[in-house]
Image (cartoon, rainbow, N blue to C red):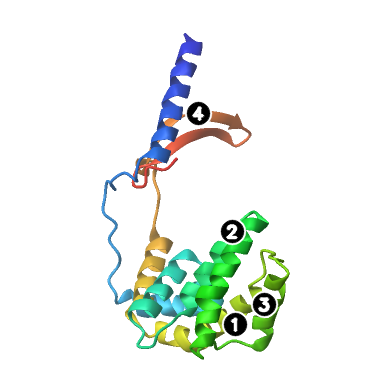
Amino acid sequence: MADLEAVLADVSYLMAMEKSRSQPAARASKKIILPDPSVRSIMQKYLEKTGEIRFEKIFNQRLGFLLLKDFAENVSETSCPQIKFYEAIKEYEKLETPEERLSKAREIYDHHIMVEMLAHSHHYTKESLQHVQKNLMKNIVPPDLFMPYVTEICEQLKEDVFPKFLESEKFTRFCQWKNLELNMQLTMNDFSVHRIIGRGGFGEVYGCRKADTGKM
């Protein structure tokens, strides 16, 4: 009987795993409500105190990057091609084979570097350009091929876009999410528990499924 119960528990757990992979996120049982925008003043002081209001800190986290990107592409009065250039480089860095990287590197060179050079709008150092050109001519495509460009892109965004972002409603939204993140408390009601998957010195480990996202 105990063996049968274990099998049924395994089946339930595996079905939940498959469901979490194959289906879109489940509807949230309770809608997330962001705090009032007035929380910005309090959160800004807190984030300044903890050293979080720095370009590197905000840009290198998913929430900060998406809000900064949204500001640069949809709010800023000046065009910001650096974001798309940066995203293309990040896609390149994730590729595993030299063949894939070579194809992507040539695409980046044609669509981002050469196009700007022809339009006399390629505002990067000669050293970065020559580094990429030299390696591409030899079909040498290491994952960090475009790192000199990444450094310059970040410097440009830090100087030109980031100060304006901090004065915008997008930064207010960032503060709202950060406030929610700091005050969010998870309980067992936020999960559906399926089975014990292990036991150890700290107790039992359960396989759980998040109610709002559907993920295990």
Q: CA distance from mark 2 to mark 1?
A: 20 Å
Give the spatial CA distance, label 3 vs label 4: 55 Å
Mark 2 touches mark 3? (CB < 8 Å): no
Q: Which residue lies most toward the top here?
A: 1
Q: Amino acid at mark 4?
A: Ile
User: Dot 1 corresponds to which residue?
Assistant: 152
Mark 4 surroundings within 10 Å by alpha-carbon count, few (fewer than 14), some (14 through 19), many (20 or more): some
**Residue 52 visible to an observer of this rendering:** no
Question: Circle 2 is placed at which residue position?
Answer: 94
**Residue 83, image x, y percentages:** 47, 75
Query: For the residue marked with disc 3, what is the amino acid?
Result: Gln
User: Which of disc 4 and disc 1 is earlier in sequence?
Assistant: 1
Residue located beneath label 4 in the image: 196
144 with respect to 3 (left or right): right
Q: Position of residue 186 (x, y in %)?
A: 40, 49
The Cα–Cα distance between marks 2 and 3, rounded to whole angstroms, is 20 Å
Instruction: Decide if residue 27 is on the left or right side of residue 138.
Output: left
Question: Which residue is pictured at 54% across the width and 62% down the height?
Answer: 91
Callout 2 touching callout 1 (CB < 8 Å)? no
Q: Where is residue 96, by image quadrant? A: bottom right
**Sequence order check, earlier mark of 2 and 1:** 2
Percent position of residue 174, x then y = 39, 72
Q: Amino acid at mark 2?
A: Lys
User: Vertically, is 133 above or below 92?
Assistant: below
Secondary element type, mark 4: strand
Q: Is residue 179 visible?
A: yes
